[in-house]
Image: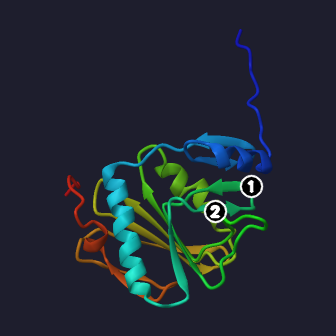
């Protein structure tokens, strides 16, 4: 017979207090805390390429690019997470009393890893959809040239477009910019053909 031991549940306040002094980042979902592992070289190259390319394309507009160290709070089911990249347009939607946590984003990007790709495409994407300004989501493979773009059509409908050729242009309607896939994968070695 197996004994069942209940996992300890944490309040959002407890999580935030722990996170302030933790040596590494963690994600919080519905009372549970999950350690986040470091990304691969390819993962980091892709995030760097995306951040610089998007930032240059945005220019002096009213949007800002944030990378993996900026926490995002999604009130639905109480998620605290660190998207690989997010773009916020307009006034920064800071969580009350916090300088390190935002509560909305226009564009969110997740670079997929084998251990998180199902979660990033599934439950996490569903949670992101409750953000009021969230209108575009990119999932980016680090093993092959493949970017999946989800664009909000209305409150409950999203359109998926896949891009898989280095010369493809990726239109980000929410930001009014176009990216070339080749720039996203610039310098990344060992991609599947």
Q: CA distance from mark 2 to mark 1?
A: 11 Å
Q: Is residue 153 above or below residue 16?
A: below
Q: At numbered mark 2, what does the secondary structure look like: helix, strand or loop? A: strand
Colour theme: rainbow
**In the image shown, does 94 or 123 lie closer to the viewer?**
94
Q: Along the polypeptide, which appears first: circle 2 or circle 1?
A: 2
**Quadrant where the C terminus lies?**
bottom left
Q: Which residue is mark 2?
A: 72
**Quadrant where the N terminus lies?**
top right
Label 2: how many Cα within 10 Å (few below 14, some 14–19, many 20+): many
**In the image shown, does 109 or 61 lie closer to the viewer?**
61
Specify the quadrant of the image occupied by residue 46.
Answer: bottom left
Q: 192 left or right of 78?
A: left
Image location (x, y in percent) of residue 154 = 63, 81
Q: Is residue 170 above or below residue 77?
A: below
Image location (x, y in percent) of residue 115 = 46, 43
Label 1: how many Cα within 10 Å (few below 14, some 14–19, many 20+): some
The mark found on residue 46 in the picture is: none
The reply to whether residue 79 is visible in this rendering is yes
Residue at 63 percent across and 62 percent down: it is: 72
Image location (x, y in percent) of residue 176 = 46, 89
**In the image shown, does 50 or 170 lie closer to the viewer?**
50
Q: At numbered mark 1, what does the secondary structure look like: helix, strand or loop? A: loop
Q: 61 left or right of 4?
A: left
Residue at 65 percent across and 44 percent down: it is: 21
Q: 111 left or right of 16?
A: left
Q: Which residue is mark 1?
A: 78
The reply to whether residue 162 is visible in this rendering is no
Residue at 20 percent across and 55 percent down: it is: 189
């Amino acid at each position: 017979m197996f004994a069942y031991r209940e996992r300890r549940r944490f309040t959002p306040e407890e999580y935030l207090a722990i996170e302030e002094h933790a040596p590494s980042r963690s994600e919080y979902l519905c009372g549970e805390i999950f350690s986040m592992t470091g990304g691969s070289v390819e993962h980091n190259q892709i995030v760097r390429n995306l951040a610089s390319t998007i930032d240059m394309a945005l220019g002096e507009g009213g949007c800002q690019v944030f990378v993996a160290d900026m926490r995002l709070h999604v009130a639905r089911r109480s998620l605290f997470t660190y998207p690989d990249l997010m773009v916020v347009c307009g006034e920064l939607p800071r969580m009350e009393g916090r300088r390190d946590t935002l509560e909305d984003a226009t564009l969110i990007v997740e670079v997929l890893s084998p251990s998180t790709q199902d979660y990033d495409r599934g439950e996490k994407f569903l949670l992101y959809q409750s953000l009021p300004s969230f209108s575009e989501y990119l999932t980016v493979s680090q093993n092959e040239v493949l970017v999946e773009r989800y664009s909000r059509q209305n409150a409950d409908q999203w359109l998926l477009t896949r891009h898989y050729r280095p010369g493809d242009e990726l239109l980000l309607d929410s930001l009014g910019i176009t990216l070339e896939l080749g720039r996203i994968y610039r310098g990344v070695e060992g991609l599947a053909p």
